[in-house]
Amino acid sequence: MEIKIPAEVTQIIDILESAGYEAYCVGGAVRDSVMGITPGDWDITTSAKPYETQELFKDFKTVDTGLKHGTLTVIINHKPFEITTFRIDGEYGDNRHPESVKFTPDLKDDLARRDFTVNALAYNKRTGIVDLYGGQDDIYNSIVKTVGNPDKRFNEDGLRIMRALRFSAVLGFEIEKETAVSIHKNKDLLKNISVERISAELTKLVCGKNAFNVLMEYSDVLSVFIPEIAPAVNFKQYGEKHAYDVWEHICHTVDTIPQEKTLRLTMLLHDLGKVPTHALNEKGNSTFKNHAGVGGEMAKDILTRLKFDKKTVNRVSFLVGNHDFEPPESKTELKHHLKNKTPEDIRTLLTIKKSDRGALSEKYRDISAGTTQTLKWLREIEENNECCTLKDLAVTGSDLLKQGFSGEEIGKRLDTLLDAVIEGKVENTKSHLLTYLL
Ligand code: ATP
Ligand code: MG
């Protein structure tokens, strides 16, 4: 099989081979190429020692990404390429970092240290694909399987547990039986892994096309770092509205929302607030008073703990906190929402609602009429610059000051005027508004 390699990679391999070393593309780029996907980045593995690579590329722009561990990044045409020396990882003392790495002249050893068979493929034009662990078969059979004994491999580096889940979700692959059993058994190893790395994998996982199956099968693994998930699994919801328990409902909503980070994380967390707010009403149906608000706080806690960036934390907790938003019954009601939400917020909340309702029982699923109507009103409001916020109001605080109002009274009066305009009780002109106040 021939793989199409970018010119820069060919150039790098040529330079290394001309100097008498072996060099191959390796890992994800080969995997993606075999799958017919255009790789995001290309990694090169070589028999040249780090300082030898450095010498060969001294006329290029390079970045020392981790020469100690064998990696030099070469920049060609503004694109980075990681060149790593064939290596054997030493003992793993902390389930994450090998205490030492040993360079080796043998590609075989380098492939043996790689996590999954599908990632343990190397390729160059001269040799073709080097596949010592059945990686190509596993690609064709859509299987994620560790290279070698899974217990041993996960104990070396616990992050591989999340990587397995991520590859399964993103590539749509099944995790092989023995690997899967080992993941469940060794899940607590994730406690030794930095949350930043876990979060990066979690984000890719939830954005994957196969996230549903992974979330359903591995909720115990996610619960290691999001313990709020465990009680949601099999948490029954009583009443004709519901089709699933809380966790299964969540998984369906993640599955149906567009594959974008904020939306996917929002759905993952949106109903965790149901567990602490659950009660049964006199008919025996579940109620979840203020579960959105409670969930918004939980989302904030969880994402902060997992060290997501502030923007993501705030946006997701806002969306979770407001996911009880329903398509409004009237344009006036919509305008009341727009007092403290942007049109963009409303559109996003509609997207969320569609997924959320889609995972209720049949009768409650369709909100297309309400959505279409809301979008139409939104467009009208935007096109006509209809007044919905304090800054659209034809009077300001200083106008009221001049009228003799002061302190908190000013804010209150402005709110009253805004509500009156939204409800059509007064025209939004300065004279009408000031008269209305009398
Ligand atoms: P992508 O770049 O699409 O996320 P990838 O497979 O290229 O996927 P990288 O994290 O870029 O993943 O790693 C490149 C390669 O390095 C992998 O394909 C794998 O061979 C190896 N590798 C990365 N992380 C590990 C790990 N924790 N344990 C063992 N091998 C790993
Ligand atoms: Mg990669």
Image: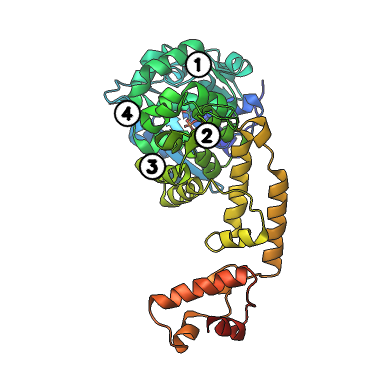
State the CA–CA distance, disc 1 to disc 2.
20 Å
The label number, if any, that marks residue 206 in the structure image:
2
State the CA–CA distance, disc 2 to disc 3.
32 Å
Disc 4 marks a residue whose amino acid type is Lys
Q: First in sequence, mark 4 or 2: give its number.
A: 4
Residue 97, image x, y percentages: 32, 28
Label 1 Cα crowd, 10 Å radius (few <14 / some 14-19 / many 20+): many
Residue 411, image x, y percentages: 45, 74
The label number, if any, that marks residue 191 in the structure image:
4
Which of the two discs, 1 and 2, sits closer to the camera?
Answer: 2
SS type, badge 2: helix
| Quadrant of the image occupied by residue 84 | top left
Q: Which residue is mark 1?
A: 145
Q: Is residue 341 above or below residue 204?
A: below
27 relative to 68 in the view: left or right: right
Q: First in sequence, mark 1 or 2: give its number.
A: 1
Label 4 with label 2: CB-CB less than 8 Å? no
SS type, badge 4: helix
Residue at 46 percent of width and 19 percent of height: 111
Residue at 70 percent of width and 70 percent of height: 384
